[in-house]
Image (cartoon, helix red, strand yellow):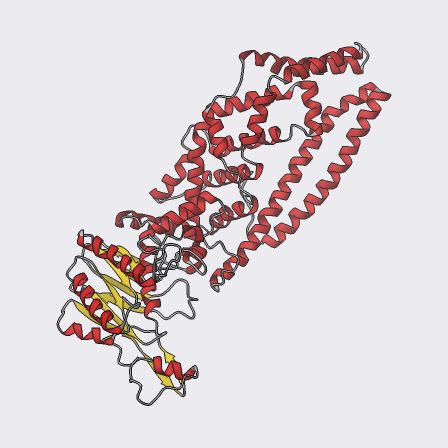
Amino acid sequence: MKTNFDLREPEKSLEGAREKALLLSFGRLVLFFAIATVLVVGISESNWIALLFLPLSALFVALILRFNKQKDLERFYQAVLEMNGFRQMRKERKFAGFDTGADFVDARHPYSSDLDLFGNHSLFQLLNHTVSQGGRNRLAHWMKYPLSPAEAKEKREALLELSENADFLTTFEGLGKAFLKQEKTKAGFYAWLQKPIYWKTFFLLPLWIGPIMGLAVLIGVLFGWISSAYLSLFIGLGLLLLGAVFRPLMEAMKVLPNDNDLKTLQAWADLLERQKFRHPLLLRFQQPVKSHGFLASKALGQLQSLTFLVENRINLMYLIFNIFFWADFFVLFRLVRWQQKVGSHMRDWEETFENWEALVSLAAFVREEGLGADVHWSTREVLQLKQVKHPLIRPEDCVANDFDFGEGQQVVLLTGSNMSGKTTFMRTVGINLVLAGMGVPPCAEAITCGPFQLYTSMRNTDSLGESVSSFYAELARIKGLLDEAAAGKKLFYLLDEILKGTNTADRIMGSEALIRQLAASSSKGIISTHDIELSDMEAVMPTLVNYSFHHDIRKEEIVFDYRIKPGPCPNFNAQKLMELMGIRLSKTAPDNQ
């Protein structure tokens, strides 16, 4: 399948493909009845007319191929139009019906379960443009395992180049969405590739004799030169010989990828082969489809044709040709040659396409969001964010913040009233560090980051199955952080409302001890709390700094600006929230909750 599509007016192109497909369908029907008439008249009245069966059959096959091409175009342009709708949904951050990637959620991962990387309204839903299981696995792997600073820098540059190629991104994704609907597992296919196909050298004899003898016998009978008994004898001999290759062809039919899978891979290969990339990383990802002495698109196109023949061996047209010309020998021979020459490269190609699915996903995200932030990977232990935003909040609703975590600071204590933005800010920092670690420009104007590994404890829940309370789950999470820090790893941690599962006195005492222990380690991070008493530690701990989010109360309404400010939070809003919900508080209630 060629991939030089016209993307300027997909609606118009879709309508044109539908009209051509309808005409070809009608022409194919007329030709089918013409072929049937030729056979009936040729056999019963005028034998020479039966000779028209072969050219008419060739024309019929050509019409089928043209019809299939138009249907492929129709499906592609339909997919492009659907993609435009998906693009608008992503812009509005409406992910209903999108793949959640929930199967990638891992509570034991250092940060993925706390930062909405997977699940409902997740980063995976915003990023994911993949269509195959392998592609989505690759994207999820990239999200969970950051690159080294040098690799992240290289990938960022490659993604910026790729994001400029809008036609390539649309075509690559459109091909997958058009054809890769129900992917067939390839486990059996790869096992089949590892063992030789049953083939004997003497099979070459019927491969060549079958067509020659079949044509000779058919002409001789039609013109009355030989008795029809010879035709019956030839057919009987053919059925006997064809039985020798029946089993290997049936084995192949069971494991060969389906037509749509191969159509997608072949089209992707053709598209990649025609691209002219500049960045070395993109060239490396492109190389496998061009580096084996032949083009992957040609080899995959051959397999697609062979798969079509194998899967349609019970088709009436194929049965006729097989009986008269012993076509199965030719098909099996081509399969053997393909397996010997190409089979060892198949897995390499599939992995290449999985990489490109993930690359296209990231580049499309960069393009759609207009990202291009400078990322500087520093050897100093600093974190500086300029105008950073959360990617899962609609850009027009999101408040950007600056944040500067200096080299001499170890702990940021973040206080603030309920719903003021503490947790969202921490997730904003974390998820943008994830993007930067993937090589994706973060949702910010600029970012400078030291040599940190991300670690979070924000969303700890109980587990009835494991008899674990949320408080114990949090302690286990914190222990993991302390163990990593004690081992000398440079972590950047995000701890949300620490030790919230216990009473106030124990929580404050335990939080103070934890803060001191973390401040003495080689790690640094942000700790949010409602315990304003902890902010007093700044006076005795020079490595601790207070930041906060504030609110205003205006005419029985709580107003937030969602901007981070230096210093501890001067007031809290729990009392006002309870009053607005109808809870009548006594006058002796404490002022700050």
Residue 523 falls left or right of residue 580: left
Q: Position of residue 148 (x, y in %)?
A: 27, 48
- Comparing 170 with 313, the one in front is 313
**Residue drawn at point x = 56 percent, y = 36 percent:** 258
**Residue drawn at point x = 21 percent, y = 67 percent:** 510
Residue 239 falls left or right of residue 349: right
Q: Going by the picture, which residue comes out furthest to the top?
A: 226
Quarter of the view holding residue 71: top right
Residue 42 in sight in this render: yes
Q: Position of residue 118 (x, y in %)?
A: 41, 55
**Residue drawn at point x = 12 percent, y = 72 percent:** 540
- Comparing 144 with 66, the one in front is 144
Q: Going by the picture, which residue comes out furthest to the bottom?
A: 587
150 versus 51 height, above or below = below
Quarter of the view holding residue 356: top left
- Comparing 174 with 56, the one in front is 174
Residue 449 in sight in this render: no
- Comparing 540 with 77, the one in front is 540
The N terminus lies in which quarter of the figure? top right
Q: Position of residue 244 (x, y in %)?
A: 60, 16
Q: Position of residue 483 (x, y in %)?
A: 21, 53
The C terminus lies in which quarter of the figure? bottom left
Q: Going by the picture, which residue comes out furthest to the front?
A: 467
